[in-house]
Image (cartoon, rainbow, N blue to C red):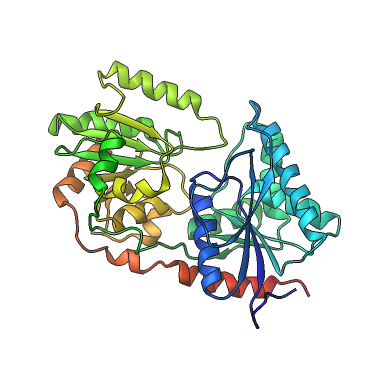
Amino acid sequence: MRGSMPGSLKIALLTHSVHPRGGVVHVLELGRALRERGHEVTVIAPASPGQRFFRDTPCRVELAAAPPTAADLADTVSERIAAVRMHLASLLRRESFDAFHAHDGIGANALADLAQHGAIAGYLRTVHHVDRFADDRVQAWELRSIVQAAQVLCVSALWRGRLRDEHGVHAQQVPNGIDLDRFTPHAVAGDADTLRRQGVTQGHPVVLSVGGIEARKNTRRLLQAFVMFRKRHPAAQLVIAGGASLLDHVSEAVAFRTEAAAMGLAIGRGEPIVITGPIPDADMPAIYRGADVFAMPSLLEGFGLAALEALASGTPTVVSDMAPFSEHFVEGEVDWADPMQPAAIADALHRALVRGRHHVAPAVCSRFSWSASAARHETLYRITEPA
């Protein structure tokens, strides 16, 4: 069944959550760009009663009713796979789609179940990165979601190579994108109020990290680096924004807070460390602009979209000196740091602070667009489209 316009496609995009995570942002931005190309896009996600997407979308939205997150990750994943599968099965009784595209293991396993029973011909799966789960059931679902896809996509050469070498999967690389109308170096009315509301103190160096406290984001080494950074800049503040996740990062957060207390750093609004938790999506541009340095010394990323958003917002940025960052950033656009060495991160934070804010988005920001990403996706949809 084609979309309503000649040559258009009817596309189902699946994501695992309605919360602000990189993969969910990718789905919403891709959906918007595909609609601008004339396609009919439905975004499908599991959601508990009362939940909705953190950001408005022009796409049609279908939320699969799922119970609240369970204490056991495998139970949560199983329940969400079932919720998406049943919701899709109901949709398919009255309509059809030209392409099913999942961006995580939950949606992809629901599609794999439907394909196994002949309800759909197949699906595409974007791999942002492959997690390692302690629970064998969850790990098996993750692998199944990849190897049973008709076509696998990824956003970096790093993961294209790892999928080939570790799983024998030949993936197609697609570009990520950045919304340069949303993320801009130029302050707007209300920025100061947003920062004040989130507990960010102006007038002193602010180091920003986005994504919460996680081991793969290297937050505890960033904390150690921040302590060293404060020896040069005693009034500096570390702001950790966001962090909504289905995964359990409690032990990492407890360790972070324990270490911060041992270092004499208070946590709270206006304190040396601010942990905002999830914040309104409309606040993010101001949060990026309000930082003096953005830090992303991650150990594992699919692409590093937040670093691109920070740069577009005029904020000098520190990233790990490794792929995928080294694929799309060049010398002079970011400051590099060995993510295993807190002293190296601290030095990079200082260099970035000295570099200062920029008033024009770096060239890297113009190398990635959601329009180009949508065009590449459209080509791949047509290649893998069911006969």
- Percent across and percent down for residue 246 are 57, 36
> In the image shown, does 82 or 280 lie closer to the viewer?
280
Hey, which quadrant is residue 221 in on the image?
top left
- Percent across and percent down for residue 349 are 23, 42
> In the image shown, does 281 or 337 lie closer to the viewer?
281
Relative to 359, residue 23 above or below: above
- Percent across and percent down for residue 176 are 46, 62
Q: Residue furthest top?
A: 262
* Quadrant of image for the N terminus: bottom right
Relative to 187, residue 139 above or below: above
**Is residue 344 visible to us here?**
no
Report the side of 387 relative to 14 (left or right).
right
Total numbered circles? 0
Q: Residue furthest bottom?
A: 6
* Quadrant of image for the C terminus: bottom right
- Percent across and percent down for residue 107 are 67, 50
- At x 62%, y 50%, the residue is 104
- At x 15%, y 37%, the residue is 204
**Is residue 283 visible to us here?**
yes
> In the image shown, does 211 or 39 lie closer to the viewer?
39
- At x 19%, y 53%, the residue is 357
Report the side of 125 relative to 197 (left or right).
right
